[in-house]
Amino acid sequence: MDEVRTEAWWGRRAWALLSAVRARTPLVQCITNLVSMDIVANAMLAAGASPAMLHCLREVPDFSPRCDAVYINVGTLSEDWLPSMRAAASAGRPWVFDPVAVAASGFRMEACLSLLALRPAVVRGNASEILALASRSDDSFKGVDSSHDSSDALQAAKALAQSSGAVVAVSGAVDFITDGIQVVSASNGVPMMQKITATGCAVTALIAAFVGADPSDALVAAACALAIFGLAGEIGMESARGPASLRMHLIDALHGLDEQTVTSGVKISLLP
């Protein structure tokens, strides 16, 4: 890194990337789980991206190469969708991977490892998912939600980044993003976001939109997307009365973010 990435630098970069998404409207193919499709599409639209929920294998060869990025999420994995995921990941576009509940079964682990071999630009998961994917073990599965803090998975994330070539993001109260050498933290968000289904899926899709708008630095794109989504949650929480209203206000806040709010509100730092 030639430049010093201060808090002010991160604020400017986050705003520049959000502005690029709004200006360029990156087309992102989303092969995502059935639970998440609505919030994924609405969050991406609110940010300025163009989501396409297209998963038919026969359409992938024509459609995926036209996209700015591809987002693949295995939450409701099926044998029918897996070939489409592999084909889209192999279409030559930058792609982002969400290995939801990777340790739930041997089939899911095998599927995720086969997708990981197709070199995603970014892998985003909770701490339990990243620990399982890095160790290739399904011994610790206790459900879709994480049973570990994000800091517990930091060394596993670095090892996974080094072995896969992907930027790895671990979500939690503090998000950690690494390329295997550098580690960045993003500290925006509110606890109630965990009470809304598929917020993790939505933020991974936002990462894909940021990568699609500017694929030159996936680590920066991932960190900024995570911080901006968390910031929208903080703003939404000011008006929310519970998880359902937070979902609505978060999407509204994401749509309404302005330069002053982003540059002064994102909490990103490069760890020593």
Image (cartoon, grey):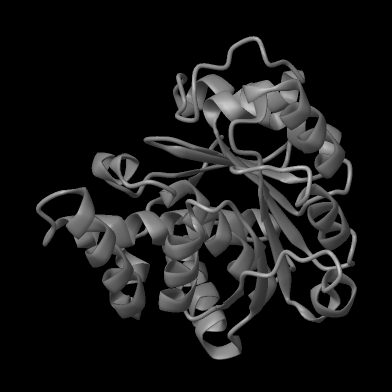
Is 39 left or right of 152, judged from the image as shown?
left
Q: Give the quadrant of the N terminus.
A: bottom right
Q: Among all residues in the image, which is located at the extreme top?
A: 139
Give the image quarter of residue 60: bottom right
Q: Position of residue 104 (x, y in %)?
A: 63, 24
Q: Position of residue 267 (x, y in %)?
A: 38, 52
Is 250 left or right of 134, judged from the image as shown?
left
Q: Among all residues in the image, which is located at the extreme front?
A: 80
Give the image quarter of residue 63: bottom right
Q: Position of residue 142 (x, y in %)?
A: 50, 17
| Residue 177 appears in the rendering | yes
Residue, x 74% and y 18% (percent of image)?
Answer: 135
Q: Give the quadrant of the C terminus.
A: top right
Q: Among all residues in the image, which is located at the extreme bottom?
A: 23
Residue, x 49% and y 54% (percent of image)?
Answer: 36
Q: Is 76 located above or below residue 216 in the figure?
A: above
Q: Position of residue 105 (x, y in %)?
A: 69, 22
Residue, x 78% and y 51% (percent of image)?
Answer: 120
Is 38 left or right of 209, judged from the image as shown?
left
Residue, x 36% and y 54% (percent of image)?
Answer: 230
Q: Name the residue nearer the viewer: 127 or 214.
A: 127
Give the image quarter of residue 72: bottom right
Q: Is 184 located above or below residue 52 in the figure?
A: above
Q: How many labels sit on residues?
A: 0
| Residue 162 appears in the rendering | no
Is 82 left or right of 267, judged from the image as shown?
right
